[in-house]
Every structure is written in structure tokens, then in C-alpha cells.
């Protein structure tokens, strides 16, 4: 195997594929890039067993040679060192050559690195087939879906299914739901396709995909066990998480006796100030609202107390008090991405809804906490 | 005690004084700002026992009122919370009022915080006298002195004196020396004063002072036990470190048989690339030079090998090889702040000199290491 490749392009691909590579793995082969020089392209592949990324560089693009002087073949090379070397070289092109099947010689006119490499057949067999239903997203839409839901997923592995975003395709709409069981985010996405699927997609995968894609389209191919995201020259393969996702149909009552509308920025800024003194009580703040007064407050024996008065608001309902984890409400308001936000309450100890006036596709649910002052 | 103060100015002072405050202290009073409202100014003071910073805000400056509606008095307030509150408020002015001597009420028109505060007499007695010899630096010179020497000081507390920069004033020159016993940086500073002193100034203090000062003059007042740096409205008080600093007079031989001159940027970039494969051998790289060839290399059984050829250099001497910790040499070259750099060698196992062609005031010494390949 041998090739001379445009350094910037090579670096870009290595950086993309490197997302799938973890610093430590029980399968040492996963610490490597798998490089396959074919007759028409270079393929670079990285994996940690759960997430696999493959990206290709063609020999030629728009009449410009990206790869020259090549011989077909394949090898495994330490991801960490290959990436660092290609990053630090100063030349426009890099030559990579496998000597005696176990030494990778990486060079330009000034530098020469010889890395111990591994034969490609020592890499685990990965299922890289694309099978199942194809759903087409605009890249910007997918990024928004992830930014509006992913934060609500659990980061703890205790209940693996809660580290996924539950995606349900039903006709021309897809519902994305994330919950850590204390709060929930639901986003509805409408498409020009007729789709039917149900999948728990790891939130980590969706975050990486949303960071990677910039413009144009992303195709998700979804089967019983696997989701594949295809974007330009890159395929991202992710396992799905098995298990039943919590039912959410009974979480949205039809009647809310207490409804508050506030300016998002003012409300978040006030909550951030009040929360300064709420640390020792796990960020619990109290909201008290009546037709003529809106106050947020927090109290700590050790530190002191804080109270904020908000002038500009609309409220329908009797005088009402509720306490909650301020970070959950701030996250929910930010996810609404709306100038004004509506908080709809059922009662002091019932989950409440955070929604936007302009965009009904995104709804958040937050569980309150008991307050002791 | 009571005052209404310009918020931005108050925040600036709190941020400066906060540098001296540590997150945890065996003396709980040190977790607080000491605020003293006097007849003509507000003084804010913070300390950790070793470093103390005091900064003041006048009532009025250039015809503009900075403090209004004040009553004299003093108090201790949690540094962490006061700083966060003043940072997060949105108003132009902040009102601070001490109620019943133990509650600090901090407010603007929207927010009200009540922090538990402590009576000022519970603060340790600090010696804030300025005594001793006064030395005047330009702020930019002091910043350069620190950037060229501080990195060579030890970060380990095993030999406390090595965590200081040794400053020796002798006539119209001051010699600053830092060493961690593996490498050494020496900077000579010439002044229009006749000075005589010897002091081990904690490198941490000098780094903080150099970050704080921007332009104009800094006055250092130095006594047997203490250095005070005065800059605009701020005084920084630091203890000195006792103990004998290593003698350096015998570290600069008069004759160097091997002298290499290289472009700083090229040489550093090449060393950074080669060092990629030198991690498992503690960043040791080998330099081999003769009249027509300059190579830097590293080798690791596990990973592989790297070799760099440098085209542009000047050399006088026989063929010569030496191995060293590449980070020490990179630091030394960067400190020279010069386009070209000169490395002067005595022998394979002798400390060598890194110096600049343009600026004789800065000289670095690096100890080599044994290489096994």
C-alpha cells in the first residue's frame, strides 16, 4: 500500500473518523485507523464497536488530484499518532507507504516518521451494510432537533434506554423524545415522506452527527438494530439501544389552571442570579406568581437569600407557588428558542409544561420539587 | 456601612483582589473580601496569608461620582458570592448595605441579595506597611522579565527556594534567575537607579503581577521579608522565600567548542514533530550536527521512530551529538524571543547554553540527558 495525498484533506478525514475512536478500548485494534487504498478512493475507518465512522477521499475531485502515486492495499495505524503527525507536518502533501507490511513510513521532504503498524486483517469484522428505511433530513433541521432534545436525555448508564433519543416515525411526522425521568423534551418533525419506524438512537451518536453536518442533506437509514447517517463522503454507523422507552401519552393534560408568559432572556437572567445562592439546596428556586406580581427566590441557611422581581409578564390563574430545579427550567426555556415562553402549571406538585408561542413542535416537561421555606 | 457604587468599577476591583483569595483556607476569614468604606475611598482587601492584594476606588474620579450615598464602616463578605452577584447583575450601579452588622444587602432595582456577613475585626491582622528599597519598573519590562524566566522555576514545593525567582540588585543592574535544577533562565535588567538587594520572590506572585499590570510604572518595594508591588490603585504584598538560592557563577564556561545557530521557528516546529514519538521516553530527542548536516531524531520501541532534517543552519565545531528533554529546549528558545537562536555546547554530558544574537540580557542553561540509541 502506498499513496501521496493532499495533507489538509487527509487531516479533515482523519479528524472526522477519529470521533469514533476512544482513547482506551478492550479491543486494541480499535485504537487504530483502518486505511484501505482502493482503485478509486482511500477509505478511512474508525470504530469503538458501538459507533463506527467511515469516510472516503477520491483520487480526483473537480479536476484536481487529491491522491497520486498510489498502490492498493490496507493497513492499521495508531489513530493518535497518525493524526498528530499529519496535523504537525507543514507540507501540502503527505506520503504514506507500508514497508514489510508492519512499518508505516509517513514523510514529506523534511520529516520522516516510521510507525509500527498492524496488518488490516486483525481489525474486527464490522457490519457496514446500509439496510432499512431511508429518511432524509436537512442538516440544519437535524442540528436543531438535537439541540432542542439531547440535553434532556440521561447521562447515566443505569437505565441505558434513557441515554437514547426515542424516534418514532408515523406517516409524515417523526416524534423525538428525550427524558432523564425528571424532565422531558419532545420535538415533532414534519417530512415529505411516509415513514414508519421506532428506534432508540444513542444521544451521543446524534450529538456527534449534529456537530459533523453543516449544510445540505443527511440520510438516516434505520433498521431494527442499527442507524446509519450518510453525509457527503461520510457514513456514521450506530447501534440502537434496546428496551422500552417510557410512555409519554399521559404526560400532557388538556387543562392548565395556571399559565404564565414571560420574556425568555429576562426570565433566564433572573433565574441565573437567584440560583447563585441555591447551590447547597441543589439549585432549587421558588416561583411565586399572582396577577400583579412575579417573584423568584432562593434561600440558604448558610449563605443567605435572593429575591428577583420580574415586571414584564402575563398571567392567568389564582396566586400560585412552585419550586423546581432552576437548571432544568433554564434548559427548557433555552431549547424553546423563542422570544417569549409559556409555563403551564397544573398544581404545586405536578409536572409542568414549558412551551413556545411561535413553535408548537417543541414541548418540554419539568418535574417540580418540594420546597421547605 | 453603606454605599452605592459603579458596578463595572466595583467588579474590576473585586476581580483584581480575588486573585489573592484561594477556594479553601485553614483560616476561613480568608474566603472573604474585607471591605472598608472610608471618608474618601472604598478599600477592598483579599489575602491567603502569603499573598495579599488591596485595591481602592475613590469617591470621585475625573469629575465623575463612582460612589454615592455612603456611610463609613467595614465588613467581611464571602468573596465567591459577592463576586458572582456583582458579575451577574445587569444594572449600572449596585447598593451595598450592612444590616445589624451581620447581613449584607446587595441590590439594584430588580434584584435583592442578603448575604450572611462577618464583622471586620475577625479578619487576621496583616502587615500592610511599605518599607525598604523602591525599584521602579516599566510594566512592559516587568512582563517580559517574567515571561523569560518564570517557566524555568520549579513547580514542586520540595525545595521551596526553587519556586522563587532570585532577584539580585547590584548597582544599576538587577539579575533575575529561575531554576528547577534541570534548567536555568537568567535575565539581566538595567535601571537608572543604584540598587542593592537580594530576594527570593515567589514565582506565583510575579506571574500574577505581570498579568495585572498593563502600562505605566510598577514600583517594587523590597525589604528583608516582603515585596510590595504598587500599580495604580492596587498594592500586592508578597512574602519572600527564605533559604539560599543555588550559586550560578560557575555555570557559564568561557569556551564552547560546538556552536549551532538556527532559525527559532523552524527548529521549534521540527522539535515538536519529532517529540510526538518521544513521549514514552520522557520527551528525549537527539540532536546530531556536523558542518553539512543537522538532524533531530527520536525513537521508541513501542511506537516507532522520527527523524527531521534541518537545511538552514550555521555550525562551528566537529561532528557532535547530544540528547535532551525537548520541552526544556523549546521553552528556552521561546524565551529568547529572537528570530535566530544560538546553542553553545561544551560536551555531550555538559549543560549547554541557549542564547539570542540580538539580546545578551537573556541566557538559558539546559542539562542534557543520556540517550540509549
Image (cartoon, coloured by chain):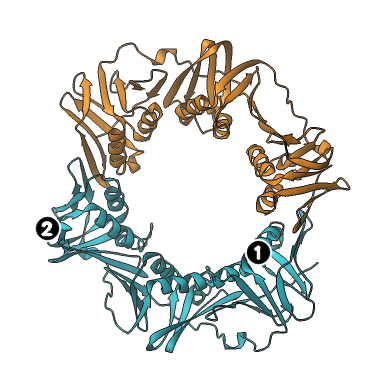
Chain colours: A orange, B cyan
x, y (%) of residue A184? 43, 24
Alpha-carbon span between mark 2 and mark 1: 60 Å
| Residue B266: image tag | 1
Q: Which residue is mark 2?
A: B70
The residue tagged with tag 2: helix, strand or loop? strand
- Where B255 falls versus A313 (above or below)? below
Subunit ID for the residue under disc 1: B
x, y (%) of residue A348? 28, 23
- Mark 1 Cα within 10 Å, few/some/many (few <14, many 20+)? some
Q: Between A343 and B267, which is closer to the camera in this rendering?
A: B267
Q: Quadrant of residue A6?
A: top right
x, y (%) of residue A279? 34, 42
- Where A287 falls versus B281 (above or below)? above
Q: Between A69 and A56, which is closer to the camera in this rendering?
A: A69
Q: Between A243 and B128, which is closer to the camera in this rendering?
A: B128
State the residue at coordinates (52%, 33%).
A156
Q: Is residue B189 left or right of residue B260?
A: left
State the residue at coordinates (38%, 58%).
B24
- Where B240 falls versus B29 (above or below)? below
Query: Reading the chain from its start, which is encountered first: label 2 or label 1?
Result: 2
Q: Is residue B236 visible?
A: yes
- Mark 2 Cα within 10 Å, few/some/many (few <14, many 20+)? some
Q: Is residue A16 left or right of residue B18?
A: right
Amino acid at each position: 500500500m502506498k499513496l501521496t495525498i493532499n495533507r489538509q484533506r487527509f487531516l479533515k478525514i482523519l479528524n472526522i473518523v477519529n470521533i469514533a475512536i476512544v482513547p482506551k478500548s478492550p479491543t486494541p485494534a480499535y485504537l487504530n485507523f483502518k486505511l484501505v487504498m482502493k482503485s478509486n478512493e482511500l477509505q478511512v475507518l474508525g470504530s469503538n464497536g458501538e459507533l463506527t465512522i467511515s469516510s472516503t477521499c477520491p483520487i480526483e475531485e473537480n479536476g484536481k488530484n487529491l491522491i497520486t502515486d498510489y498502490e492498493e492495499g490496507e493497513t492499521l495505524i495508531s489513530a493518535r499518532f497518525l493524526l498528530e503527525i499529519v496535523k504537525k507536518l507543514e507540507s501540502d502533501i503527505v506520503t504514506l507507504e507500508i514497508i514489510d507490511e508492519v512499518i508505516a513510513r509517513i514523510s514529506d521532504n523534511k520529516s520522516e516518521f516510521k510507525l509500527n503498524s498492524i496488518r488490516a486483517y486483525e481489525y474486527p469484522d464490522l457490519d457496514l451494510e446500509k439496510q432499512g428505511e431511508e429518511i432524509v433530513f436537512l442538516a440544519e433541521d437535524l442540528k436543531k432537533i438535537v439541540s432542542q432534545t439531547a440535553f434532556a436525555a440521561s447521562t447515566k448508564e443505569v437505565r441505558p434506554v434513557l441515554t437514547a433519543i426515542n424516534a418514532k416515525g408515523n406517516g409524515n411526522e417523526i416524534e423525538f423524545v428525550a427524558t432523564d425521568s425528571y424532565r422531558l423534551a419532545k420535538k415533532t418533525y414534519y417530512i415529505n415522506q411516509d415513514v414508519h419506524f421506532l428506534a432508540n438512537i444513542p444521544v451521543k451518536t446524534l450529538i456527534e452527527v449534529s456537530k459533523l453536518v453543516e449544510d445540505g442533506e443527511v440520510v438516516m437509514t434505520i433498521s431494527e438494530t442499527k442507524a446509519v447517517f450518510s453525509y457527503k463522503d461520510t457514513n456514521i454507523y450506530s447501534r440502537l439501544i434496546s428496551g422500552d422507552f417510557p410512555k409519554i401519552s399521559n404526560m400532557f393534560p388538556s387543562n392548565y389552571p395556571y399559565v404564565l408568559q414571560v420574556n425568555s432572556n429576562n426570565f433566564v437572567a433572573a433565574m441565573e442570579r437567584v440560583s447563585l445562592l441555591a447551590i447547597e439546596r441543589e439549585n432549587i428556586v421558588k416561583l411565586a406568581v399572582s396577577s400583579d406580581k412575579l417573584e423568584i427566590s432562593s434561600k440558604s441557611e448558610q449563605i443567605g437569600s435572593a429575591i428577583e422581581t420580574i415586571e414584564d409578564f402575563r398571567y392567568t390563574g389564582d396566586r400560585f407557588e412552585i419550586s423546581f430545579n432552576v437548571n432544568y427550567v433554564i434548559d427548557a426555556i433555552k431549547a424553546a428558542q423563542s422570544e417569549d415562553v409559556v409555563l403551564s402549571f397544573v398544581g404545586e406538585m405536578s409536572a409542568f409544561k414549558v412551551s413556545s408561542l411561535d413553535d408548537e413542535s417543541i414541548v418540554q416537561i419539568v418535574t417540580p420539587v418540594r420546597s421547605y421555606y
